[in-house]
Structures are given as C-alpha cells and as structure tokens.
Image (cartoon, grey):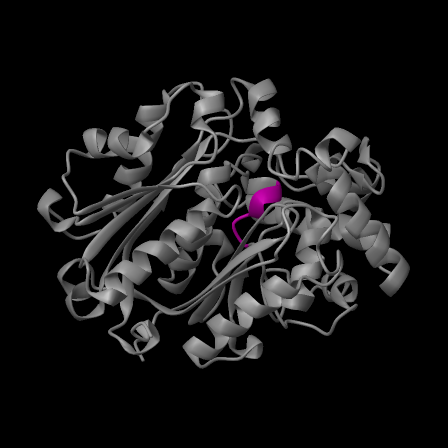
Amino acid sequence: MGKDISMSSDVAIVGAGITKFGKRHDVTYRELLAEAAAEAIATVDEIRPSDIEGLYVSASMPELTVDQAHVGNLAAQELGITPKIVSRIEMACSSGSTAVRNAWAAIKSGLIDTAIIVGLEKMTHNPQMANKGLCIVPDVEYESINGITAYSGFALAARKHMQEYGTTREQLSLVAVKNHSNAAKNEKAQFHSMGEITLEKAMNARMVSDPLNLFDCSPITDGGAAVILTRGDIAKEFTDQPIWIRGSGQSIEPSLGISNIRSITEWHALKKAAKQAYEMANVKPSDIDVAETHDCFTIAEIIEYEDLGFTKKGTGGKFIEDGESRLDGSLPVNTSGGLKAKGHPIGATGLAQIAEITSQLRGQAGKRQVDDAKIGLTHNLAGFATHHVVHILSNEAR
C-alpha cells in the first residue's frame, strides 16, 4: 500500500497570477505562456531558476489551435529552467486543477520541493478549431455524431433540473447577472469592459440550446495563469503570505459522455471529490468563505451549489435567487466573474481559480474582496461533468 500523502508535510502556494483574458491577438502562444509564468513569479519575493524542480503545463488543444505539440519542452525553453519533472496535462476543462493536484502530490511525496504550473489556451484566432476541440471532448463515436455537445448536454441538465426541482429561467439568468457584475470589478476579465448586465438582458438573449441562451454559456477565450507551489516548511523563503492547500479531492465517473452518467442533475463524482477535500482539510461546507466553481453554463453553477454542500439538493436556484452567492451574500461564488464572464481558456481555467482564491485569502482582490476571507474552495470540472477536482485553500497553517 502506498504512503498516505495526506499525513505528510503541507504544501503552500507562494505565487499565483493570471494574464488578461479575452482576445489576445497581441501575443503568440509562447509569449502568452511566458506572460502567465511572469505574472506568478512577480508575486514571489525571490525565486531562482534552480529552485523550480517541477514544471507542469496545462494545455488542452494547442495541436489544434496553434499547431504546436510538445509544449512541456516549449515551457522549459521559455522559462529557462531544467526541472526534475516536466509534464504536460490534458484533462479537457479540468486540466489546470489536475496539474495543480499532480504537482501537489509530487511535493507531498518528497520527490520535489518546488514546482511551477502554467496553464494557457489561445482559442479566439482560430474559433473553428477551438470549437472542434470542444466538440471532441464528449463521446465522439456514440454521442457527438448524434448532436450531443457541451451546449446540448448541459441544456438537458438544465431542463431536467427545472422539471425535478422547479428551477426557473430567471434563476439561471441571475447567475449570469452576478458573474458579470463581478467581472466588471476584475480588470483581467474578458467581459470587464461590458460592465454589469440587467436581468432583462440576460433573460432575453439569443437562444443557443433551449433553455440555455447566450448569457448562460461561457465564451471561448485566450489567456494564461500560473501557480507556484512549494514545501510548507520552506514557504516563508518565497513569500510572507503563503496560502496553504489544506485539502484536495478528485473523482471521475466511469463515463466519457452523457449516456453513462448516473444522473445529469446530481453529480456523484463532484460529491465524492468534495468529500475527499473537506475531510482532508477537516472543514465543512459551512466553513468556506469564498469559492470559485466551474460555471461553464449557468446551470452548472446551480448544481455545484448543491453538490458541494452549500445548499440542499434542489435548492440551488433559490440559493442564487436569495443572493447567497453574491459578493455581499453568505458565500460569495465566482468573485472573479467565473468562466461565464472572466472567460474560459480551457487549460488556464483551473489555475485562474486558484489565483483568484489566493488573491482573496491574501486580501488583494480589490473591489471584489470578500471581507475576512480565511478559507476558500476551487472546483474545476471536465466533460459532461464526469471529472471533478476540488481544492480547499487557507491563509492559516494547520
């Protein structure tokens, strides 16, 4: 039996940053990669190339969108480092958080001391290939050829949730209104300049896949993010404000697409991943002060309220309607603007969530700062909600 890594030394986040999200035609892929790494390095007091023993690159579709493979070596070249571990991670939309978990495990095991994880995607200059990349995430042989895409799959989940629990069209739109309001306070968000949107605008947008309209769906995005992790006992060598990874959970359904998932409105793999993370961190859902969850579609955020334990099953719609997940609510969710309004550059998304919670726990989130935030959660999913990764972060050591 392998070593119980949950009992070994803690791992700390000592640096985290994101680039501007949106249409980044001003940079090449490698320049975006370097920019993301530089954003994280700038938040560290001092770090030498020789300190970085692990390099993890989260990238979902560079072969399709920028005609570049072997991006792990590309990152090593751009950063000028020769780490002990170099790994490229591809788990579709959850690539970033999976890469963080892999680096966390390597440090916990004692294999390395310090790692940088860089995630990025350039999608907007080649939307046809970006859309192809998204469409081959579901089961191509059995589902995609019959019209099942992320849009139609999550639309089925929304319709079923409405039938089972009485979730309304207005409640879906309230998620979009909240997240655009948060993005208006985040200068790096894709839709920052759009500002806040009204409920009427969100409800009356062009239909994409009934009942989901344009404002229920996250966009394609260019952007990067990076995180630097190290052993807890040396974290103060890099920063006076380490953020501790107190818990980490991961779970996957034995399903590639929608046809084999146990339920489209209750995500058992998410509940399992969350349970792992909560138990490792020794916290409860009620202990979470701020969260970044995977709102690829507005219905996803509503289901995540429930399956992360923030509210009872079937009451996610009421949770947003009552304002509980707003900045001034009992549990602010997606303070960055979320995937919906901050943007969703696939490989960078999970890392951007970590960067946002790091900023919140350090008290550096500016206009979207949550008062007295001590414990944060990130949740990143892939496929038709068949793979989930949850992290619990704290600004206090155990």
Q: Position of residue 180 (x, y in %)?
A: 63, 44
Relative to 122, 191 lies left or right: right
Relative to 15, 47 lies left or right: left
- In this orientation, which residue lies closer to the viewer: 388 or 205? 388
Q: Is residue 398 magenta?
A: no
In the displayed orientation, state which residue is furthest to the front: 1
Q: Which residues are magenta?
A: 335-340
Note whether 23 is above or below 243 in the view shown.
above
Note whether 300 is above or below 81 in the view shown.
below
Note whether 179 is above or below 390 in the view shown.
above
The answer to whether residue 242 of the structure is visible from this angle is: no
The residue sitting at 69% across, 72% down in the picture is 311
- In this orientation, which residue lies closer to the viewer: 372 or 5? 5
The residue sitting at 24% across, 73% down in the picture is 9
The residue sitting at 20% across, 29% down in the picture is 77
The answer to whether residue 50 of the structure is visible from this angle is: yes
User: Toward which corner of the image does residue 31 lie, by quadrant?
Assistant: top left
